[in-house]
Structure formats: C-alpha cells, structure tokens
C-alpha cells in the first residue's frame, strides 16, 4: 500500500488578500527609504537617521541630536529643492516658512 503526499490547496481569497496588503506596504517602505536617502546625500552629507529625526521633529518633539547646520541643509535647501515640482500645492509654502525662521543656510 502506497501513501501519497497530501495536496496543498491554496485558497485564492487568502492569496489575494495578502497580496493587497504586502505589495502596497513594500512600495510605501521603498518610497520612504528612497526619499530619506535622497535627502541625506549631497555636498554636505547628513546621516539618514538624522534626516528621519529632523523630519519627525517637525511633527513630534524629539530630543535634539543634530546640529543647526544639518537642519538648515535638510529643511532649508534639500527639502525645498525636492518639493519645487509640487511647490504650488504643499512644498513651497512649508519650506519658505522654514526658510524665514532660519536665517543661515549652508550651501
């Protein structure tokens, strides 16, 4: 008497549901990672973790571990330059407000 291996049956609903969750989650994480890396790379290098802390600090108060120069570079120069394509909607007014608050900019 031979025994056969049990057949693996995958229900299509479960597969589609997990795909609907996983794919957008992976894409969102990828977009955030690329955005953080693009804000950290340049003439004046700012570590990725400091870029994340500077951006989160605009919403939630965090203990300050970065310098004023890093803040000026990330918010005053790079974020304003990266938001210029969508300047009329969100980016320019927010970056301009930050620029007015801080007078010194490192180029």
Image (cartoon, grey):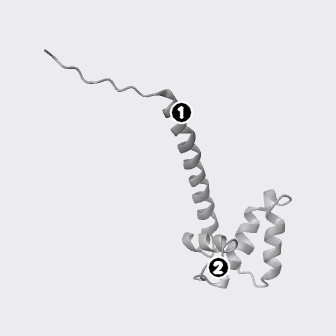
Q: Which residue lies furthest to the top in this view?
A: 1
- Mark 2 lies on a secondary structure that is helix
Viewer-nearest of discs 2 and 1: 1
Residue at 79%, 63% (x, y): give it.
91
Residue 47 appears in the figure: no
59 left or right of 94 in image: left
- Mark 1 lies on a secondary structure that is helix
Q: In which quarter of the image is residue 92?
A: bottom right
Can you identify the residue that label 1 sits on? 16
Q: Earlier in the sequence, mark 2 or mark 1?
A: 1
Residue 18 appears in the figure: yes
| Residue 47 x/y as whole percent | 55, 73
Q: Looking at the figure, which quarter contains the N terminus?
A: top left
Residue at 22%, 20% (x, y): give it.
4
Point out which mark residue 70 bears: 2
75 in relation to 2, above or below: below
Q: Looking at the figure, which quarter contains the C terminus?
A: bottom right
How far apart in space, not on screen, are marks 2 and 1 (Cα)? 44 Å
| Residue 51 x/y as whole percent | 61, 71
48, 16: nearer the viewer: 16
Residue at 55%, 71% (x, y): give it.
49
């Amino acid at each position: 008497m031979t025994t056969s291996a049990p057949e693996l049956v995958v229900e299509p609903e479960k597969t589609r549901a997990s795909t609907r969750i996983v794919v957008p989650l992976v894409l969102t994480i990828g977009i955030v990672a690329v955005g953080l890396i693009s804000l950290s790379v340049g003439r004046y290098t700012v570590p990725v973790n400091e870029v994340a802390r500077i951006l989160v600090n605009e919403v939630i108060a965090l203990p300050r571990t970065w310098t004023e120069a890093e803040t000026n570079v990330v918010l005053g120069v790079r974020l304003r330059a990266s938001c210029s394509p969508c300047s009329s909607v969100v980016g320019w007014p927010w970056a301009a407000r930050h620029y007015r608050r801080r007078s010194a900019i490192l180029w």
